[in-house]
Image: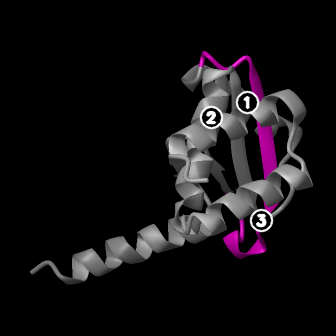
């Protein structure tokens, strides 16, 4: 089966909205990608599914932090998401913990990412310091 990525994304989106995500669906998607030698398109496929969900009024936001986020932070993220994506009737936060971020939070929307982690801030500071070294 050699479906274009966008058509596969629509099928996945429709199925997951209707029935949720299942192990069987995941295995079928993996089989299709392996069989058609398109595993390199997985990230693009997931972004397409994300956008299709948004067109169906579901917004999934991935929140990664070093520690569990508090209810006020969770509510702020949902409020900001609804402001930027008014078509989303339901905002779903997928929260993950990554201690390598040290602190802060990284928030991923379907079309953009905000990295407010300590690691990102340190990296920005290093870049700024290095760019000043190069100036006369």
Residue sitting farthest toward the left: 136
Element under disc 2 = helix
User: Residue 61's image quarter?
Assistant: top right
Q: Residue at x 53, y 67 (%)?
A: 40
Report if the CB atoms under discs 3 and 1 are less than 8 Å apart. no
Label 3 sits on a secondary structure element that is: loop
Does label 3 or label 2 sit earlier along the sequence?
A: 2
Q: Position of residue 58 (x, y in %)?
A: 72, 26
Q: Nearer the viewer, residue 51 or 126?
A: 51
Q: Please provide percent x and percent y for residue 109.
A: 59, 41
Q: Which mark is residue 14?
A: 1
Label 3: which residue? 66
Q: Residue at x 53, y 60 (%)?
A: 41
Q: In the displayed structure, does residue 23 sit left or right of residue 90?
A: right
Q: Residue at x 55, y 53 (%)?
A: 2
Does residue 93 show up magenta in the picture?
Answer: yes
Residue 48 visible in the snapshot: yes
Q: Is residue 15 above or below residue 82?
A: below
Dot 2 corresponds to which residue? 10
Instruction: Point out the stretch of residues depicted in magenta.
Output: 86-104
For residue 118, side relative to residue 26 (left or right): left
Colour scheme of the rendered structure: one colour
Question: In the displayed structure, would residue 5 be above or below residue 19?
Answer: below
Cα distance, mark 1 to mark 2? 6 Å
Q: Are marks 1 and 2 in contact (CB under 8 Å)?
A: yes
- Within the magenta stretch, is there residue 122? no
Q: Earlier in the sequence, mark 3 or mark 1?
A: 1
Tag in front: 3 or 1: 1
Vertical placement of residue 136 versus 88, above or below: below
Badge 3 local density, few (<14 within 10 Å), some, or many (20+)?
A: some
């Amino acid at each position: 089966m050699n479906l274009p990525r966008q058509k596969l994304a629509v099928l996945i989106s429709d199925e997951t909205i209707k029935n949720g995500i299942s192990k069987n669906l995941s295995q079928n998607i993996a089989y299709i990608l392996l069989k058609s030698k398109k595993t390199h398109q997985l990230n693009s496929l997931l972004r397409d599914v994300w956008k299709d969900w948004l067109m169906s009024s579901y917004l999934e936001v991935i929140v990664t932090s070093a520690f569990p986020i508090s209810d006020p932070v969770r509510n702020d993220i949902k409020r900001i998401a609804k402001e930027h994506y008014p078509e989303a009737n339901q905002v779903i936060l997928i929260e993950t913990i990554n201690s390598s971020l040290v602190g802060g939070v990284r928030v991923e929307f379907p079309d953009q990412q905000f990295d407010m982690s300590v690691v990102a801030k340190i990296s920005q500071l290093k870049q700024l310091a290095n760019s000043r070294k190069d100036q006369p």
